[in-house]
Each structure stands twice: as C-alpha cells, then as structure tokens.
Image (cartoon, grey):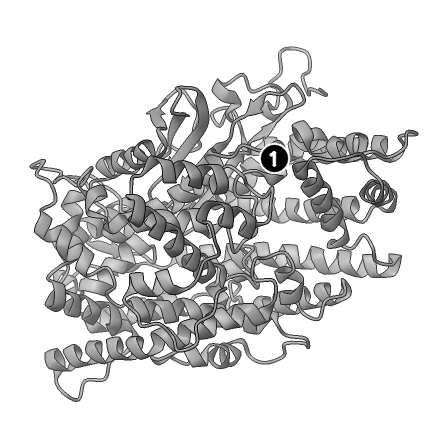
Amino acid sequence: MNEKATENNKRINPFFENFNTLHDTYPFDRIRLEDFEEAFIEGIRRDNEQIEKNINNPEKPTFDNTILNKDDDNGYYDLLDRVSTVFFNLLSAETNDEMDALAQKIEPMLTQHANDVTLNKRLFERIKAVHRHHRRLTPEEKKLLDNVYEGFSRSGALLSDEDKEKLRKLSEEASMLSLQYSQNLRNERKAFILHLTDEADLAGLPDRVRETAAQDARDRDLEGWVITLDAPSMGPFMKYSTRRDLRQRLYMASNTVCTHDNETNNLEICKRLVNLRREMAQLLGFKSYADYVLKHRMASNSRNVYHLLDQLIEAYKPTAEKELQEIEKIARKEEGRHFVLEPWDMPHYSYLLQMKKYNIDSEMLRPYFELSRVIDGVFGLAHRLYGITFKENQSIPVYHPDVKAYEVFDKDGSYLAVFYADFHPRKGKQGGAWMTSFQGQYINRKGENIRPHVSVVMNLTKPTADKPALLSLGEVETFLHEFGHSLHGMFANTRFESLSGTNVWWDFVELPSQFMENYSVEKEFLRTFAFHYQTGEPLPDELIDRIVKSRNFMVAYGCLRQVSLGLLDMAYYTRKDELTEDIMSFERKAWKKAIIFKQLPDTCMTVQFSHIMAGGYAAGYYSYKWAEVLDADAFSVFKKNGIFDQATAQRFRDHILSKGGTEHPMTLYRRFRGGEPTIDALLKRNGIRKPRKDKKQ
C-alpha cells in the first residue's frame, strides 16, 4: 500500500494502513476530518491506476480478469469504498459545518470519477466482450456479470461521445443539487425552535413531555422549554398540547421548511432535479425517469405501480373518510359545532378519539418501553427466531458516545456481524431513521467469509435528568423496522459484496423491515420485554388487549397518506416533458385523488420529501406499499405456523434474508412462500373489505 508515512514518526492517515481493530471495524477514534480529502484523492488515484491495468491487459478479457477484478475481494475499489462509506454515513449521522463544506468539494470529484469509469470506452469494451463470450458461470456469477454490464449501459456506456458528455454534465449537476437539497433541509429543520417561557404554553402536556422540553432548553443554555422539529419533540407536542395557536405555529414551521425566500429554499432545486432525471433517462433511451427506474424493480412498469395504488385507494378510501368524519365529530363535540378542523388539529383530536374508543395512549405505555428493555426485547426476538445473540463490546470504536457497538454471534456461536445502534437526535444528525452498512458481506479470494458491519440510526426519545429513555409504541415499531433491515444485512451470505444484504431491488428491500413491524402488537412478543421501568411489573394483559384492538386505528387514513406520496412521486417521474409548473400547485394536483383532508396553500411536501429528491427512492416510493403487501402475506405464514416458529424463520432466512440480490426477488419470495402474494392478507390485517376486482400483484 502507498502509505503516507514520513520520517520522524509522523502520523499516518488511518485510511492508508490496516485498521488493526476487532473485526477490522473503523477506527473512529483515530480518524480526523482532514483525513477524508486526502483519502478520497488517493482512492481515486488508485482506482484510475487499476483501471489502466485492466484496459491495458494484453490477455483476452475474461470474467476472472475483468469482472472479478472489479468486485471480488473489494478489488481496486477498496480504499475509495472505505472512505466514502465512513464519510457519507457520518454526513447523515454526525456532521458539522466543516463536513458539509467538504461534501460540497468532494461530491463533484466523486461524480466526475464515477462518470470517468462508466463512460470509459475501452473498459466497457472489455466488459462487453465478456458479456458476449464467457466461461460457464454459476448463477451468482452470471447475475454479477449482468449487473455490471447493465450498470455501465444504464450509465451511458452505449451512448455517442457527444451524448456521453451531455450525460456527464447532467449527472454532475444532479449530484450537487441532491447534496444541496439535503443540506438545506437539515439546516432549516435544525435551525427552528419553539422557545416557551410561560408555563401556560405547556397546557395539556404530560410531565414527560415537559421534562424533555426543559432538557432541550438546558442543552441550548436557555430558560424554559424548547420544542424542536425532531419527531420525539414535535410529535408529542402536536398530540397533547391544548394550545391551538402553538400547534399551528409548529405545524406551519414544519410544513413550510425550505419554501422561504432565503438560501435554503428547495423549490427550484426540486424542479431542476425532476427535469435533470427526465433528461438523463431520455438520453439513455427511456420515455421517462420512471421507465428507467422500474425496469429493475418488481413492479416492472408504471402501469403496475398505479394498479397497486388504485387498488389501495378503492379499498381504503371509504374507511379513511369515515375515520376523518369521526375526528371532526369529536373535535366539534369538544369545541362547538362550528369548529373547523385544521391540519394542526389532527394529531390532537386523533388522540382524543383514540382515548375515547380504546382508552389507550402512548404515555400510558412509555413506562413499559424503557429503551434498554426494548433492546433486550428486539435482540431476544432475533434470538428466538434465528438463534443469534448480541454482546455489547465497548472496545469497538464508535463515532459518537451515543452509539453502542455489539458483536453478533450465530446460533452455533460463530461470529456473524458487528451491529452499531445510534438511538437519539442531536444537532449534527438528520431526522428520521435508517439502516446503513459500514462493511458489506462477501467471500474473498482466500475463501474467507468477510462478515458485515451494519448500523441503525434513529431519532428516538432521549432520557431526561430523572428518567431513562422511555419509548412510544410507534418508536418500538421504528426500531423493529430498522432492525429488520439490519438482519437483512447481517444474515447476508453471498459471494459478491455488490449482491449481498440489502443490495436488492428497492420494492423488495422493505420486506424484511416491514415484516418485523408485525411483532410490535403481538402479545407473545410484548410479554418478553415490556416491564415497568420503576416497578418491574409486566405490561398488563388488559393494556395489551387494548393495543391489539387499536392497531388499526386510523389505518386507512395513514394508508391514503402513503398512497398520496406514491402518486406524487410517480407524477414527477412519469413526466415525458419539462416540468415548468410551480411545485406547490403541481403537488396539489398530483396527489388529489388520495387526499381527503385539506392542504394549505403555503405548505409543501416536495421540498422536504428526501426519499424521492435525495434519498434514492425517486420513482420508487410506492415500494413501501408494495412491500407491505409482501410483509403481510409473509407474516400470515408465521401466524399460521406460530410467530416464533423456528422452521419458518429458517426458511425466511435461507430464501430471503441471506440471498441478497443473487436472484429475482419474486423467485426468492415464491421459494419461501410457495406462491405469489396477493393483497388479501394486508386487507385482512387492516380490517378492510376486499375490493370488488382484486388481482394478484
């Protein structure tokens, strides 16, 4: 390796040497900000050097000397992959102004390099030669070869030189705008606080919510209480506060981010991103960006996506309208018959309705969902299903004191993976929750199975001065969701890293995560960990029964919300001509048939819809509902055989979780299920009548 050591024992950039850590985990305690740029530059140089060796190889192109050279044992992408993985994971989980500025500098370099690789005519000629003439390949080798060839062709390798340059410019601009979009959104959401100094402003808030707000104020050296736009802060305030004026202020702050006349406005960025993606797709021979994306999705085409969304509208809309009427009814009963329900009223009166119907509320449940107990419960579920165990190891370096690192061991006691868990919101962290990898699984040239390092990053309720972190049931569900993704990563068992773990089609990747959510309302699971944090008393059966009965509360309204986002996504990316219309007006028309409650003219979802603008879900947000059909169908097998049935779990592991992207997702699913899924199990789970004309997906 080209180590940057100099005389006098000068410090070596940690990316340029072996980490010498347990399981080769990243030495976060040794990595400095200045290490990244140097490592990026060197990583690109090494890539270019290896590419030159490849294209100048006098031997006939073969799978082994051309394709394996790129993928097996991480090949010549090792350094660049390593530094990119750390940098961009930290950019989401633990960033600062200096990292943001460096990202603006690095992103163009990486995009240019990626284009230099995929648009390299001589390199593609070798790949094309192998694709046409190759030795007998295993199914996994054939999948890798097809993916590499398709990856190059879908990145412009078949274009003329003139069109390659057009594509290069378009992709570089899109890359920078996506980064700017994300930074704008994070900065504006983190900049807002609702600072309260009068105790009357806390009307309706439970003690725990007040304590959290007081802690957030102290963290900022402020008196009083602070409410932020982070979900654990804003969500409870909107739910419990009886101060309608403050709910309105908070709602409008959240729903108008990045629409203001300032440097963080995302409106024109969104419009430009939509047009750039359409232009790139059309340059590559597709009618729309959706056509480009869906070619490699289970849905196959936009017609099938719309079929699913329309099915869901038909099935759920009548129930959703009744749910809304119930909310309006209880609001008028509380406030008077002339009361007009507004969007900032929905969480509060939904809460009152839930209390009336089921006498259940997240604050009742929080004492039973203390974070350390929830961790034990989630890990215990994995052990009961798959036999794996988790052992915290504080000697594994982490990137922030909040992060916990675990070694994961398989049922035979062998090492399986490293698991990082990052639970709470903080200044340098994006909102939401996600799973990511620091190292993917693969088998190297020596035949060693290199095990993965996966991470879940969430924004769960923080502990206060006198209480541990007490979660809502929704947060438990979020944990289970991201943990499902992590199991997909940890159980990976394929030869090639680019086919392992969550490297699957995006309308399949949500199956393992949404599958795990099913357990959040299962009595047998709740009884394993839900104990009162002070008394140790188990969650009463009577409360569990209320949880189960209330699981479908507002489910149809929530479904239509997801469908509306899917419609918005498809409206942008099925376009065949330039988007010139104002984003806000376009948005209102795009999702109209799934909207049953008013959208205020100044609010906008698109400017903060990171999934489709900067998160890789463009023309793919329908995936959550698509995968929900799969997860309900899959869980019905467990319901039949027993929710902890190890034989069923082993089939799920063998045919879904360990296979990654080595085969078509439906092939994998059929192998587990014994047939294709239908919408029936989802409708049954949600208590919704079956549509008149239901078809298989």
- The picture places residue 220, in percent across and down from the top left corner, at 30, 47
**Residue that numbered label 1 is attached to:** 497
Residue 82 % position (x, y): 60, 32
Left or right of 196 in this view: 117: right
Q: Nearer the viewer, residue 164 or 696?
A: 696
- The local crowd at label 1, few if under 14, some if 14 to 19, many if 20 or more residues have their Cα within 10 Å, is many
Query: Which quadrant of the rendered structure holds the N terminus?
Result: top right
Of residues 129 and 71, the one drawn nearer to the viewer in this rendering: 129
Q: Residue furthest bottom?
A: 338
Q: In this view, does 599 lie above or below 110?
A: below
Amino acid type of disc 1? Glu
Quarter-of-image position of residue 408: top left
Residue at x 62% of width, y 16% of height: 10
Q: For the view shown, which residue lies furthest in the front direction?
A: 674
In terms of image quadrants, where is residue 573?
Answer: bottom right
Say if 435 sits above or below 440 in the image.
below
Left or right side of 500 for 116: right
**Image x and y of residue 630, in percent:** 43, 55
Q: Is residue 399 above or below residue 260?
A: above
